[in-house]
Image (cartoon, helix red, strand yellow):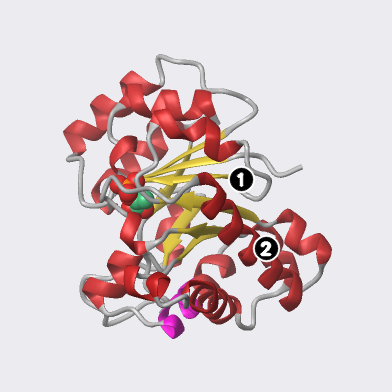
Amino acid sequence: MRKPLIAGNWKMNMTATETEDFIDQLLTNKLPDDVEAAVCGPFTSLTILSDRAKDSGLKIGAQNVYFEEKGAFTGEVSAAMLKDINMTYVITGHSERREIFGETDSDVNKKNKAVLSVGMIPIVCVGETDEERTAGKHEEKVQQQVTSALQGLKEDDVKELVIAYEPIWAIGTGKSASSDDANAMCEIIRDTVLNLYNQATAENVRILYGGSVKPATIEDLMSKEHVDGALVGGASLKVDDYLQLLAGA
Ligand code: PEP
């Protein structure tokens, strides 16, 4: 059984003070046992989150990492540094990093290896543009991104992986994919893992949908066979919305 995961992606939001307020308010509530809750904050929030979330069941993740171990890479943060402050997850391959910061499929693959090498779990983002969908190239694009992201990864690591299907046209736009379309793409991702590895691995890997998920849409999404949760930007920034997402998952 795959445990549902609701992962918040705060992007470049939340100061340290706002983070303290959020986590203190969130943790006055009991988090559900049957859904995994995770928050991926900006680097400046991570220690606060991991310290305060200790023993609460809430998992904490980073939104980026650099793949080299250490050295002259000004401004970068390594996987070992994130592991040392008890990160569970690291988002890799988010479309904003690919589009704004020029990250390539090869970078994403190297980041996945770095994250796994220290015992954290990548949340690997893939998804097509509006033009690619209109041209009927969305399936091919996502298969290619998944194949590249997983290149050289061991079966045992892939089993624990999280992959997020995030159509770029749905991110932050208020225009979500239908739950049927999301399910169809998540199934394609699972089939890609099946072809690259085997049935046990494909059945274990968790596949999330991301793109304008809201409390009002989570239940329908979660009723779909291949959707194991959601990666949520905007709606993860308010405690009430986040709690409703967890309740609906
Ligand atoms: C995201 O940034 O991963 C995302 C899905 O954002 P939003 O929920 O705001 O569309």
Left or right of residue 5, residue 10 in this image: left
Pointer 2 residue: 190
Answer whether residue 212 is visible to the viewer in this image: yes
For the residue marked with disc 1, what is the amino acid? Asp
Coordinates of residue 222 in the picture (x, y in percent): 58, 37
Vertical comparison of 61 with 242: above or below: below
Highlighted magenta segment, given as a residue range:
105-111
> Crowdedness of circle 1 by 10 Å Cα count: few (<14), some, many (20+)?
many
Q: Residue furthest right?
A: 199
Q: What secondary structure is the stretch in magenta mostly built from?
A: helix
> Crowdedness of circle 2 by 10 Å Cα count: few (<14), some, many (20+)?
many
Coordinates of residue 161 in the picture (x, y in percent): 61, 60
Q: Secondary structure at mark 1?
A: loop
Query: For this rendering, which residue is in front, 29 or 186?
Result: 186
Vertical comparison of 60 with 27: above or below: below
Residue at the location (28% across, 53% down)?
43
Answer whether residue 57 is visible to the viewer in this image: no
Coordinates of residue 50 in the picture (x, y in percent): 41, 39
Residue at the location (33% across, 74% down)?
131
Residue at the location (22% across, 72% down)?
100
Vertical comparison of 175 with 137: above or below: above
Vertical comparison of 158 with 216: above or below: below
Real-space Cα distance between discs 1 and 2? Answer: 11 Å
Coordinates of residue 239 in the picture (x, y in percent): 33, 25
For the residue marked with disc 2, what is the amino acid? Arg
Pointer 1 residue: 228
Left or right of residue 179, residue 27 in this image: left
Left or right of residue 17, residue 78 in this image: right
Quarter of the figure that contains the N terminus: top right
